[in-house]
Image (cartoon, grey):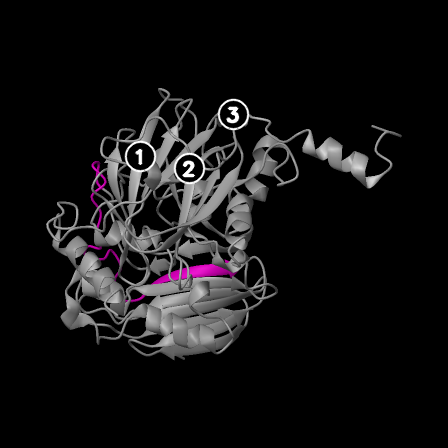
Amino acid sequence: MSGSLTDPMAARDHARAMGGTVVDTMPVLPPVADDLPAGVSDDDLVWEETIAAGGYASRRLSRGARLRLIDVEGDACASLMIFNAETPAERLNVADTVKVQWNGYLGAGKLLLSDMGRVMMSIVHDDAGTHDAFCGTSNAATNQAKYGEGRNSGAYPNGRDRLILGAAKHGLQRRDVHPCINLFKGARIEADGAITPQAGPYDSGRSVVLRAEMDVIVVIANCPHVLDPREEYSVTPLRVSAWRGPLTHEDDPVRLASPEGLRAFLNVEDYYRR
Amino acid sequence: MTTDPHIAGLSGTIVHDEIVPARAPWLHHIAAGQTLRIVDLEGNQAVDFLLYSAADDAERYSAQDTVSAQGNLFLREGTVLRSNEGRPMMTIAATTVDYHDTIGGACSCESNTLRYGHFTKSQHACVENFLEANLTEGRGKRDIVSNINFFMNVPVEADGTLGIVDGISAPGMTVDLRAEMDVVVVVSNCPQINNPCNGFNPTPVRMIVAA
């Protein structure tokens, strides 16, 4: 490039020539998807993005929105944090999520609960089955130990630093990055407490759909599971789509599935009674 | 001369010795190299426990980093309590209880409404204690993360079923925690009366710091 971009107009033309480039991992604006579920209008699509291996994304979604995650190539790991969009001091509480539902394994029909006794999102579809509420994500130290490097600026970014950047885009800080859940990579617990990671890789195209039960900020990092036994930094792109949807009806089977879950819905419905 | 059985085996000079009343919060700074002994005086009293780095309190105890690093959910003798940045904060140097919990979290007025019903909203809870203690040092709600529950038993069954069940502690049982960095310990002596974590009867615990 030396010599040819010495004036701003030349630099502008050079920059503008890059516009329209299409790569596999990028947001699509305005969002377009050719595989929306039956009954979902193209006009209701609000987010279409494919997150790079080792990348992250964050976004505000309205109550009622559906968030679909697709493990495009079978080796994604979606580390997810959720905040109440209008009061981010309220956020996903992984301990309450497993304790209140008397079960530690996530899947269809499970609720993701806040630290204020409210349901933030519910899992309305899951054909993956391998998820993890126990292990959290990698950090700079674990990636340094495992891959020799783990910085955002390097080739092997760690999940925690990705979540911090995603949260920071909404004005949040290091102290706001709390325990997360991992979708698509699992962990089974043995009787003696031992953790057996389920790192795949799996069939391509597995999907999970979450329904926002309040206005939320979701932060998603796509880095290898912290207990992935493979020596290589192994992760593939994660596709994210979101569309507007109706608020959960009082007869919704997920809402009515347990007395504890019903009270989590009653609490969020009470929160919006204003 | 009488011997205090709660001090047996604790080496060094005792620099702090305090009874935390039933249902109360407790906050204490512990320097690297010092050891905190928690004594379950009357047995099966859950001690909800958080840690912050004294130098940088955005670095704090991380349940997920701790269990991932050791590949096991249960906290036993030898467990290193790790921070959200993967650094050792304290080590369980010794404990007379087989294992302790770090997946069950802390009771709150809000989660109690889910677990037991809205009639429990007015009952005191661990998050109230965590907030009260942390607010004295400028930390707040954003600083309350998943905690440890010493002397509490949360088994996980093959299908993922889990819950707080009868404890495996007993009167006089202890856990010794050696500080690996300068830390702020924040405790809620759990006031819960709706599950077996305190034997349905919250009781005092004793905190002894040896240097």
Type of amino acid at the residue the image marks with label 1: Val
Q: How many labels does the image show?
A: 3
- Image side of residue B6 versus residue B171, left or right: right
**Comparing marks 3 and 1, which lies closer to the viewer?**
3
Q: Determine whether label 3 and label 1 are within 8 Å by CB.
A: no
State whether residue A264 is above or below residue A156: below
Mark 1, other Cα within 10 Å: few <14 / some 14–19 / many ≥20: many
- The subunit letter for the residue under badge 1 reads A
The outermost residue toward the right is A3
Query: Residue A211: image x %, image y %?
Result: 28, 45
Q: Distance between the residues labelled 3 and 2?
A: 17 Å
Which residue is under mark 3?
A24
Please name the predominant secondary structure of the magenta segment in the image: loop
- The subunit letter for the residue under badge 3 reads A
Type of amino acid at the residue the image marks with label 3: Asp
Which numbered disc flags the more N-terminal residue, 1 or 2?
A: 2
Query: Residue A184: image x %, image y %?
Result: 36, 32
Q: Can residue A207 be seen in this view?
A: yes
| Quadrant of res B142 | bottom left
Q: Is residue B9 visible?
A: no
Residue A208 numbered mark, or none: 1
Q: Determine whether label 1 and label 2 are within 8 Å by CB.
A: yes
Label 1 secondary element: strand
Query: Residue A173: image x %, image y %?
Result: 54, 58
Which numbered disc flags the more N-terminal residue, 3 or 2?
A: 3
Q: Which of A104 and A129 is in front in this view?
A: A129
Q: How far apart are marks 1 and 2 (CA)?
A: 10 Å
Q: Nearer the viewer, residue A183 or B175?
A: A183
